[in-house]
Amino acid sequence: MWAIRWTALVGGAAVAVALTGHPLSAQEAACTDTECFVNAVADCRATTFETAEPGGMDARGRYRVLGHEGPACRIEFTFLENPNPAWVETPFTFLVDPSMSSPEMIHGAVETCLLGGAEWYQCEGPLIELIVGLSEPEEGLVDGTGPLPCGEPVGETGPALYPMPENGRWGYVDRDGAWQIEPQWQRATDFSEGRAAVGGPSGWGIIDREGNTILPPQYQGATFVTIGGQNWYGSPFSTYSEGCTVMTHFTDMEQPSFFVDRQGQVYWRGENLPETLAGRDIRRFGVFSEGVAWFQDGFGEEARFGWVDAQGEIVIAPEFVAAGRFAEGLAFAAVRDGQGAYIDRDGQPVLPRKWTLYGGAPFSEGIAKVNTGAFDVSYWQRDNAVAFETVDFGAAQGERPASAGIGDEAGSFRDGRAPIITDFLDGDDLVYVRADGTVAFEPDALDGIAVCNRRALPEFRNGLVRLLVADDGENCGDEPFYAAMAQYDTAHYVYLDTEGDVVLRQEK
């Protein structure tokens, strides 16, 4: 058993008290330096040791040697101070080989437990359940009652918050760089409608603008990347839109998606579908936008897409092989591969009026990225006019051409800027363009900036864009930069404004 402990003052003396679990015994010695504790671990004798930097982390914690388990030694660790209050006085234990006792081994065991490698050191206890998500994934999901509370925009309730890492943990700052939510998560996403997804390698949850937990960080998406032998799972949550997020989580298999409201209650999960969808093979939902969300009925080549409103009424029948989010009155849909168009709420093609497109992103700020062919990308305006088909650098500079083609990788307009990677034959450069296709700035051409996550196509949010850049301004090294980690050896994060000026910078 495990317990939360505290220290009480009795008659002027500090007395350790245990609710349940492992009480502090009178036979335990207390080490005051690392060498003493390392020797105690080597002998696996009952000892306590407090340290200001457990595992290299900016916190304060206490180790306790509990005793032998076979040839191994069981050690308990408890945070006494931590930026995340939920971690304080919430213990966990782990096993080590006492013959290998060293500061690096002990610190490494703590870090590994907290990074999700619980099986390596047989890590267990309340903090592991909280951080790593060893509890049953379905726990904590509560079905909501009444109608689905989605389909209406939710305004932001305060100034913009920006994810920022410090000492290997993500928190949130305002535009002046002041911490509004202290760093405490290994991964974090942008806020939308007052909610953000946060977590660690093995699980994600939802928080509000004060950092309070809406859903605990224990849910996994179906995708993951492996870094240093550890699987880092993708988030099962979409960005909040019109009051809800779509959750598609993975247990022993990928589960059909459902909606989660801003209070963390779930809707349309499992058999709890509206009457119009009951009996269908519903696999996935899109987020609500303009009062409707797309849904997928069936699997593989048999899958068909339609749209449903928040009352559960099908507004566009599932007759399409691809579907997108409605924005500015239009949504992309396709009747066959390579035969798509932007449709209206009647399901009719209006942009263009024939099924000729290979793909299309939702409209944003009056412009959408459109795939007019298998490898042809351009940007269209809402009124059927082409906004631009090439990137314009202005006057030629050195060997650079005045214009470049648009590559396969291109993003949406936000705050008047869209990220585009130019065609490989024209330089393969990341640029941010204006609505007329002219280049506002090229990050790698800025003084002291070398972008390490260019393929992620970072988009603007609340007037700023977050880029991962090389520490030395020149070379990103060989690290993998695709997992949005809070700490890299050779890179750090910056926020640029729409003119390419640095507004915020991660301190390392």
Image (tube, helix red, strand yellow):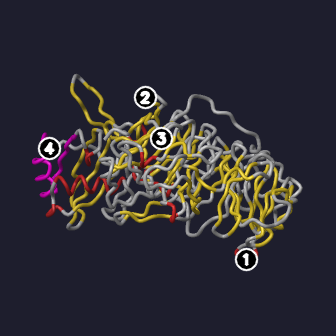
* Residue positioned 37% across, 56% down in the render: 124
In what element is the residue under mark 1? helix
What's the CA distance linking mark 4 and mark 2? Answer: 42 Å
Which residue in the structure is indicated by mark 1?
301
Q: Given the image, on which type of amino acid does mark 4 rest?
A: Ala
- Precedes in sequence: disc 4 or disc 3: 4
In what element is the residue under mark 3? strand
**Eyeballing the image, is 390 above or below 436?**
below
Judge the density around disc 3: few (<14), some (14-19), many (≥20) Cα neighbours within 10 Å.
many
**Residue at the top extreme?**
12
Which residue in the structure is indicated by mark 3?
163
- Closest to the observer: 64 or 373? 373
Q: Can residue 206 be seen here?
A: no
The label shown at residue 29 is 4
The label shown at residue 178 is 2
* Residue positioned 69% across, 42% down in the render: 365
**Residue at the bottom extreme?**
301
- Precedes in sequence: disc 2 or disc 3: 3
- Precedes in sequence: disc 4 or disc 1: 4
In this picture, residue 197 sits left or right of residue 266: left
- Precedes in sequence: disc 1 or disc 2: 2
Q: Position of residue 34 (x, y in %)?
A: 14, 46
Q: Given the image, on which type of amino acid does mark 2 rest?
A: Ala
Q: Given the image, on which type of amino acid does mark 1 rest?
A: Glu
